[in-house]
């Protein structure tokens, strides 16, 4: 029981410390990325569009082959 409590205390301490440090780091990172948000969003949308067109073509090529 003692080791269980010590493990829980250790886990909570490490988890909270890492969460706090990661939270500060992510705020700093997001501040640096802010000027490039529209470029990043555009690249993500372009990638999603390319993926969707590719999937659509693969699906329709497979259905055309099955119909013959």
Image (cartoon, helix red, strand yellow):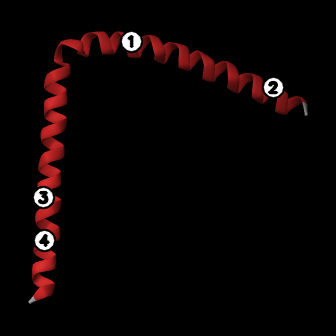
First reached walking from the N terminus: tag 3 or tag 2: 2
Q: Residue at x 50, y 13 (%)?
A: 21
- Give x and y (percent) for residue 30: 32, 15
Of the numbered discs in the image, which one, if any, rests on residue 6?
A: 2
Distance Cα–Cα, label 3 vs label 4: 10 Å
Q: Is residue 30 found left or right of 9 in the rendered image? A: left
Q: Which residue is mark 1?
A: 27
Distance Cα–Cα, label 2 vs label 4: 59 Å
Mark 3 or mark 1, which is nearer to you?
Answer: 3
Distance Cα–Cα, label 2 vs label 1: 32 Å
Q: Considering depth in this image, is 52 or 31 the residue closer to the camera?
A: 52
Hey, which quadrant is residue 11 in on the image? top right
Q: Which residue is mark 4?
A: 60
Q: Considering depth in this image, is 44 or 22 the residue closer to the camera?
A: 44
Q: Which residue is mark 3?
A: 54
Distance Cα–Cα, label 4 vs label 1: 44 Å
Element on which disc 4 rests? helix
Vertical arrangement, residue 30 with respect to residue 4, above or below:
above
Distance Cα–Cα, label 3 vs label 2: 53 Å
Element on which disc 2 rests? helix
- Give x and y (percent) for residue 4: 83, 33
Element on which disc 3 rests? helix
Element on which disc 1 rests? helix
Outermost residue, bottom side: 68
- Give x and y (percent) for residue 19: 54, 19
């Amino acid at each position: 029981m003692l080791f269980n409590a010590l493990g829980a205390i250790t886990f909570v301490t490490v988890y909270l410390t890492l969460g706090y440090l990661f939270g500060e780091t992510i705020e700093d990172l997001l501040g640096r990325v802010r000027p490039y948000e529209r470029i990043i969003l555009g690249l993500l949308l372009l990638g999603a569009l390319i993926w969707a067109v590719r999937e659509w073509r693969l699906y329709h090529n497979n259905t055309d082959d099955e119909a013959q």
